[in-house]
Amino acid sequence: MSSTAVLPAGACPLENYLTQPDHTMDARIAAAREALGKTTLILGHHYQRDEVIRFAGITGDSYKLAKAGAESAADFIVFCGVHFMAESADVLGREGQQVILPDLNAGCSMADMAEIGQVEEAWRQLVRLGLTDDAGAGMTPMTYMNSTAAIKAFCGERGGLVCTSSNAKGAFAWGFARSPKVFFLPDQHLGRNTAFRMGIPLEEMAVWDPFQILGGNTPERLRKARVILWKGHCSVHQRFLPEHVDHVRAQYPGIHVVVHPECRWEVCRKADSIGSTEQILKTIREAPTGTKFAVGTEIHLVNRAAKLAAQQGKMVITLDDSGCLCTTMFRISPKHLCWALENLLEGQVVHRIQVSVEVKRWARVALERMLEIQA
Ligand code: 13P
Ligand code: SF4
């Protein structure tokens, strides 16, 4: 991870916060946020807990938050989300702006499934096979936002781009307009679901396993494939199964099943609609009174949506009744947020996320291409 954990002399130590109950932080967070005023923007992803997201100046999905950070004049961005989001905010941020991730352990297991060395090796093999040149003339490398800045830079340098779950379709169209093939990292499900919805049959997709020669494929298979999907997944969304869809439909006839595109293809095929976290919330908000929803995504979003929907005479339940929790999103606690803000008040930047200048250059190109494609 290209981040720095800086705790300057005089900073308030985190240990003093971790021993306190969460609720004792509320008034302190509110006061610190007030005192910091316009200098500091708190961004909150929809998977954050209630106790944290209530303090966010802007809430949203990855795309909306990346855009908000890029447009912000604040000196400090406190990112209540995960590492790749904070890295992207640092890449897109203006000169002098500093990005803070309140807990550096807030990573993403899917992003960890692709390492830059593995991606470079895969690309070398694809080049050797004659499927593309190093500049990406035959194949556009495209990475989901949920990846390291180094992988984003790799894509940017080879004519490719980043996408999020909200603009993946537009990004694939962009990729196919410049080359006959797309190499998609690291979420096989988002890649498969998006390509399939664009009319590409499964037979024209191959999965690349980074632990096998040629990703576990024959040269013929790779030659035939229009989309090569990195073998990565989200362990939270993979827990939703097609049987869950059948079960809620049997229990609540007429229920609307809406899922995140990180869910398996078999689940997405059975769903009524698919969307990013922001798009799921919009679908629920805009539905007529009386609509019932089963939602396939992280449980904090679902529980919050359920409370709001109940006030509008709608019903929201989780698709899998054991409820899927993103444990890394959960790492951001009121204590970590309070610690980051009170240190800022003392003039100390803690847990700054800083991408190196070399990586930033091409990662920015890839992220700017992403922002040009409508969500
Ligand atoms: P969104 O861009 O839809 O918010 O998704 C981010 C994410 O990590 C979902 O697991
Ligand atoms: Fe990563 Fe999955 Fe958590 Fe999203 S829900 S941040 S993809 S682990």
Image (cartoon, rainbow, N blue to C red):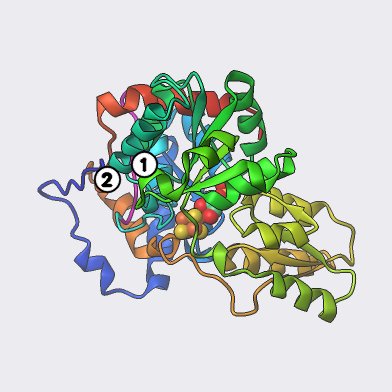
- Image: 242 above or below 344: below
Locate residue 69 relative to residue 336 in the image: left or right. Answer: right
Please tell me whether the stretch drawn in magenta is mainly helix, strand or loop: loop
Tag 1–tag 2 contact (CB < 8 Å): yes
Q: Which residue is mark 2?
A: 1
Locate residue 348 relative to residue 298 in the image: left or right. Answer: left
Nearer the observer, 345 or 133: 133
- Using the rendered image of the protein, determine whether residue 39 is visible from the camera's viewpoint: no
x 62%, y 59%: residue: 264
Q: Secondary structure at mark 2?
A: loop
Q: Is residue 99 magenta?
A: yes
Q: Which residues are magenta?
A: 95-103
Classed neighbour count for the residue bearing mark 2: other residues with Cα under 10 Å, few (<14), some (14–19), many (≥20)? some
x 27%, y 43%: residue: 352
Q: Is mark 2 within 8 Å of ligand 2?
A: no
Q: What number is the disc on residue 148?
A: 1
Q: What number is the disc on residue 71?
A: none
Q: Is residue 339 magenta?
A: no
x 58%, y 19%: residue: 178
Classed neighbour count for the residue bearing mark 1: other residues with Cα under 10 Å, few (<14), some (14–19), many (≥20)? many
Q: How many marks?
A: 2
Q: Secondary structure at mark 1?
A: loop
Amino acid on which disc 1 is placed: Thr
Nearer the observer, 96 or 219: 219
